[in-house]
Structure formats: structure tokens, C-alpha cells
């Protein structure tokens, strides 16, 4: 714009091969995590239900990246999986995961993992102050 701020003037949707239309408020649960690993919300990463808030989260990640927030996305080298690294990166950027989202996790292993990662990030953020 006239003040030097990034401005989106034209946008196009892409990667529509994995698009789906979500009807109502009930999340869609699948045995696989949809979409690209870099842009998934925590509930998408854990296959615990995709709903409209998941799309808003993913769109927010794309916007942050497009407007210069790319450094939040690099993957650490020593992690169990890319999915784990990305979730940990989201927590480092946005803060600990809300308890309500942790409680939505269907699989107890994911619930436990998310609680532990969220706690670590909370502790890490406390030492950064």
C-alpha cells in the first residue's frame, strides 16, 4: 500500500484436489490427515476431526507465511516426525494449546502427546521472558 505495508491485491486458490465441503458443525473424522503437512491445524495433524475452524487455522498459517512469517515453519532436524515438529512449531508461535482442543483428541496417545508438548512450550516460553 502507500505506507509500505504488504497488501494482497490478487489471490487464487490452489491444491483443490484435497478440498472438501464441510456441512454443519460436526467435524469430519478420517483415518488419514488431509492436506499438506505444513498447513494443517492441530486437529488435522492428529486426524481428530476437520471442521470449519480447521480451515480458518490453516488459512491463517498461509497468510502469516505469505506476509513474511516464514521463519515459524522450519523443521528441526531431530524430531520423531514432521507432523510432531510442525505441531511443536505452532505451539512455539501461538503459545500452548487450549485445554478444549486437547480434550477433543479422540486417540489417548495424541492427547497425551499434545499435553506434554504444550506443557514444554509453556515452560520454554516462561524461560524466554
Image (spheres, rainbow, N blue to C red):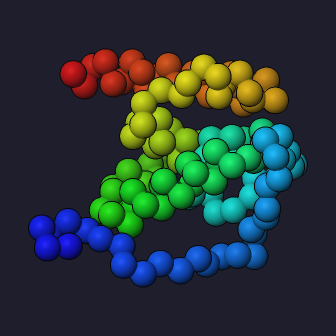
Looking at the picture, how far across and down is residue 34, in whole percent? Answer: 74, 58
Position of residue 66 relative to residue 46, above or below, is: below
Q: Give 81 or 110, whichever is nearer the viewer.
A: 110
Residue at 74% x, 68% y is: 19
Question: Total label count?
Answer: 0
Nearest the eye: 86 or 16: 16
Residue occupying the point 65% across, 76% down = 15
Decide if residue 51 is in sight here: yes
Task: Locate residue 24, reporting x and y percent.
Answer: 82, 46
Q: Residue at x 71, y 21 (%)?
A: 103
Q: Does residue 45 appear in this view?
A: no
Image location (x, y in percent) of residue 85: 53, 45
Q: Residue furthest left?
A: 3
Q: Is residue 127 left or right of residue 115?
A: left
19, above or below 127, in the image: below
**Which residue is at 79% across, 64% downward?**
20
Judge from the rendering whether residue 47 lies leftward or rightward of residue 85; answer left or right.
right
- In front: 51, or 68? 51
Residue 129 lies left or right of residue 37; in this view the side is left
Q: Residue 102 in the image: x percent, y percent?
A: 66, 25
- Quadrant location of the N terminus? bottom left
Is 13 placed left or right of 43 in the picture?
Answer: left
Work out which quarter of the rendered image holds the C terminus and state it: top left
Amino acid at each position: 500500500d502507500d505506507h509500505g505495508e504488504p497488501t494482497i491485491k490478487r489471490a487464487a486458490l490452489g491444491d483443490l484436489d484435497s478440498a472438501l465441503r464441510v456441512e454443519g458443525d460436526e467435524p469430519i473424522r478420517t483415518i488419514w490427515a488431509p492436506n499438506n503437512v505444513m498447513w494443517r491445524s492441530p486437529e488435522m495433524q492428529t486426524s481428530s476431526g476437520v471442521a470449519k475452524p480447521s480451515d480458518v487455522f490453516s488459512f491463517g498459517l498461509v497468510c502469516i507465511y505469505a506476509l513474511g512469517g516464514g521463519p515459524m515453519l522450519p523443521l528441526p532436524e531431530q524430531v520423531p516426525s514432521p507432523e510432531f515438529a510442525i505441531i511443536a512449531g505452532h505451539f512455539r508461535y501461538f503459545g500452548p494449546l487450549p485445554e478444549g482442543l486437547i480434550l477433543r483428541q479422540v486417540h489417548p496417545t495424541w492427547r497425551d502427546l499434545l499435553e506434554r508438548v504444550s506443557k514444554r512450550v509453556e515452560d520454554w516460553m516462561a524461560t524466554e521472558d
